Image: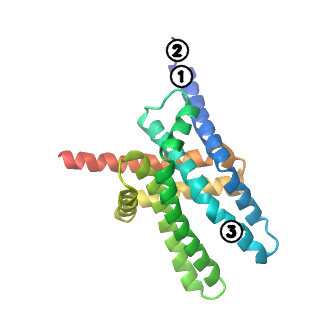
């Protein structure tokens, strides 16, 4: 058996984690290619009058593409956190994608509706009422954390869709420490990815956010279990 202690063992562990994050993120990015192309078109849009022609297909595609792919990525993050992953990352990612597709699609439709309404409110009030725009931006942070927790709850518990939505919402508003952890860690990863090293987005950004978010969620889960057993 190869010696994995000392410096070489540390290097092996680092390379193993990098390969996990990278392969998982590349699969996630590949499955999200239609959403990514639409987002790039939206960001490079010169004529604001054409925004509807990009937003409409983006809204329609996202529940079918982004949510199943991200649920599969969170399922992989759960394996990494719990240290029970399979040897073949590609196979298990596809398995989770298919296994959770309908549930994640149902949740995706609900969250996309909420995100669309919220984005429309922010866009409308951005030039009309600064206070209300800021209120909706705060709500966007709340919705972001709720969405993240929805993925974590879905891959960890066995419930109906309504149960996933309720459980993730109560965790979002009921655990300030988890809320802040997700906001701060995601903000740091997104800032570095968007403004410093954009190439990280297809390579590791999604995996890092999923891993850090599920790690925080899993610590809360274990704490709740331990409190119940006392």
Mark 1 lies on residue: 9
User: Where's residue 44, x and y in %?
Assistant: 79, 65
Q: Residue at x 52, y 70 (%)?
A: 114
Position of residue 119 relative to residue 11, above or below, is below
Give the numbered dot on residue 116. Answer: none
Q: How many residues crowd around disc 2 within 10 Å: few (fewer than 14), some, or many (20 or more)?
A: few
Whether the residues at callouts 2 and 3 have beta carbons within 8 Å, the answer is no
Distance Cα–Cα, label 2 vs label 3: 53 Å
Distance Cα–Cα, label 3 vs label 1: 48 Å
Looking at the image, is mark 2 or mark 3 nearer the viewer?
3
Mark 2 lies on residue: 3
Point out the residue furthest to the top here.
1
Q: Residue at x 67, y 43 (%)?
A: 203
* Residue sitting nearer the eye, 222 or 89: 89
Position of residue 8 relative to residue 123, above or below, is above
Q: Is residue 183 in view?
A: no
Point out the residue furthest to the left here.
230
Q: Residue at x 49, y 53 (%)?
A: 104
Helix, strand or loop for disc 3: helix
User: Where's residue 33, x and y in %?
Assistant: 69, 50
User: Where's residue 115, x and y in %?
Assistant: 55, 68
Position of residue 72 relative to residue 181, above or below, is above
Mark 3 lies on residue: 55
Distance Cα–Cα, label 1 vs label 2: 7 Å
User: Where's residue 210, x and y in %?
Assistant: 52, 48
Q: How many residues crowd around disc 3 within 10 Å: few (fewer than 14), some, or many (20 or more)?
A: some
Q: How many residues crowd around disc 1 within 10 Å: few (fewer than 14), some, or many (20 or more)?
A: few
Whether the residues at callouts 1 and 2 have beta carbons within 8 Å, the answer is yes
Helix, strand or loop for disc 1: helix
Of mark 3 and mark 1, the one earlier in the sequence is: 1
């Amino acid at each position: 058996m190869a010696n994995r202690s000392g410096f070489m063992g540390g290097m092996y562990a680092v390379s193993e984690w990098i390969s996990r994050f990278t392969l998982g993120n590349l699969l996630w990015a590949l499955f999200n290619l239609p959403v990514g192309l639409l987002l790039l078109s939206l960001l490079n849009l010169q004529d604001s009058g054409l925004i509807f022609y990009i937003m409409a297909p983006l809204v329609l595609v996202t529940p079918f593409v982004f949510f199943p792919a991200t649920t599969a990525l969170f399922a992989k993050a759960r394996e990494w956190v719990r240290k029970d992953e399979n040897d073949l990352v590609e196979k298990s990612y596809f398995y989770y994608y298919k296994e959770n597709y309908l549930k994640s699609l149902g949740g995706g439709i609900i969250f996309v509706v909420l995100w669309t309404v919220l984005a429309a409110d922010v866009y409308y009030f951005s030039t009309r009422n600064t206070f209300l725009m800021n209120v909706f931006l705060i709500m966007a942070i709340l919705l972001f954390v709720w969405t993240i927790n929805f993925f974590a709850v879905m891959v960890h518990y066995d419930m109906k869709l309504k149960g996933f939505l309720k459980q993730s919402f109560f965790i979002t508003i009921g655990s300030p420490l988890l809320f802040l952890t997700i906001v701060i860690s995601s903000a740091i990863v997104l800032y570095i990815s968007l403004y410093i090293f954009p190439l990280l987005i297809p390579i590791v950004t999604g995996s890092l956010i999923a891993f850090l978010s599920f790690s925080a969620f899993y610590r809360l889960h274990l704490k709740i279990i331990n409190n119940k057993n006392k």
